[in-house]
Image (tube, rainbow, N blue to C red):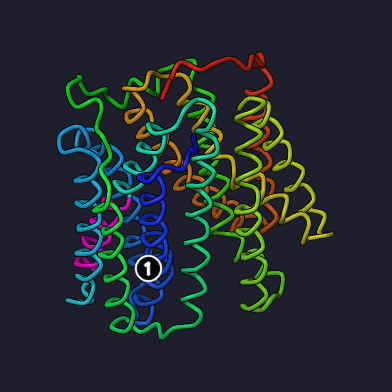
Amino acid sequence: MSAYSRPVTLLLCGLLLLTISIAVLNTLVPLWLSHEQLPTWQVGLVSSSYFTGNLLGTLVAGSLIKRIGFNRSYYLSCIMFAVATAGLALSMDFWSWITARFVAGVGCALVWVVVESALLRSGTVNNRGQLLAAYMIMYYIGTVVGQLLVGTVPTALMSVLPWVTTLIVIAMLPLLLTHIENQDSDQPRHAVMPMFRRRNARLGINGCIISGIVLGSLYGLMPLFLSHQGMSDADVGYWMALLVSAGIIGQWPVGRLADRYGRLMVLRIQIFAVILGSIAMLSGYAMAPTLFILGCAGFTLYPVAMSWACEKVNSEELVAMNQALLMSYTIGSLAGPTMTALLMQSYSDRLLFVMIAVVSLVYLVMLMRKADHHHNPVATA
């Protein structure tokens, strides 16, 4: 039986539309504020408010899904995102935009938890890697499409908000055509914090943190690194497109390998490849294959680490574990670029790859200390 059932396919279609909207807004919101002559620290706070909303959204998602189910949680998250996006047109006031982006962050996090949890629940131990790979492929395709749209359509505030808001509303339509069963509605809700204390899932949780640090640093600081090398904006866009495209290409084969040979072995290979890619970037040679390796290995860490952790819990605990993993990734994506940017500013841009290599090496040591037993996981479909 195919892993891509009707609910899964429709979920992924909705995710694609939402991701396009997220990518467009995450790029243009700082630019719009900059054009209004807001100081840099205020622009930074508006961006941070979105990620703070992500953290809150991951915390409340489990209780919301249990109370009103997957479908209604998805509709509510889309409505929150659409209203917050349309609200940007009301005023350019600093506090208004902080509030709107915070609400948008909550809505986006709810979408991610709903989609990821529904995919994990619909899959089996033999195809969860493939499902999460498909999820990441759609996410990265949406990100690339969003970036391409930014470069091809008018980017004025009132030119973008109408069609982006419409896109978010349209993203609600696929789930009107199907129903996702909330199988645990009659069981007690599992808290998120105990998931962090699950010793057998700790490598997966740590992997999501490392993934957040690596991807947050690459997304946020690689353009700065390339620009400081004397590249034009067009060249920077080319290299970033190569990086993300490598992540898309790597999702499917890595997911299949993880399902067949075990998450632990694949995680070891991925982390080793990230370390090699970082060292190669420091040498300054063969940037095209090096960036391809970094993108292919680094952008596939999150789904494999997530699969590892979700194998260690019962099916009724999957939503809580998914919240914990998304929270771990968000914390990593906030902390990584902040620490790396300070090091780059104080010392050298080359510290970007030193930082990535060091945190990856720490995780590799953790992985090597774990015995490789590729056995049937606890969670079942």
- Label 1 environment density (alpha carbons within 10 Å; few <14, some 14–19, many ≥20): many
Q: Which residue is drawn at 82% across and 54% down?
A: 283
102 in the magenta segment = yes
372 in the magenta segment = no
Q: Which residue is drawn at 71% across and 70% down?
A: 229
**Which residue is more in the foreground, 192 or 256?**
256
**Residue 205 locus on image (x, y percent):** 48, 29
Q: Mark 1: which secondary structure? A: helix
**Residue 44 locus on image (x, y percent):** 38, 62
Q: Which residue is drawn at 29% across and 76% down?
A: 161
User: Which quarter shows the C terminus?
Assistant: top left
**Which residue is more in the foreground, 38 or 320?**
320
Q: Residue at x 62, y 45 (%)?
A: 298
Quarter where residue 226 is shown = bottom right
Please indicate whether residue 218 sits to the left or right of residue 283 in the image: left
The chief SS type of the magenta part is helix
Residue on which the image places disc 1: 25
Write the start and end of the magenta stretch as one range: 94-108
Please indicate whether residue 350 sits to the left or right of residue 72 in the image: right
**Which residue is more in the foreground, 41 or 295?**
295
How many marks do you count on the picture? 1
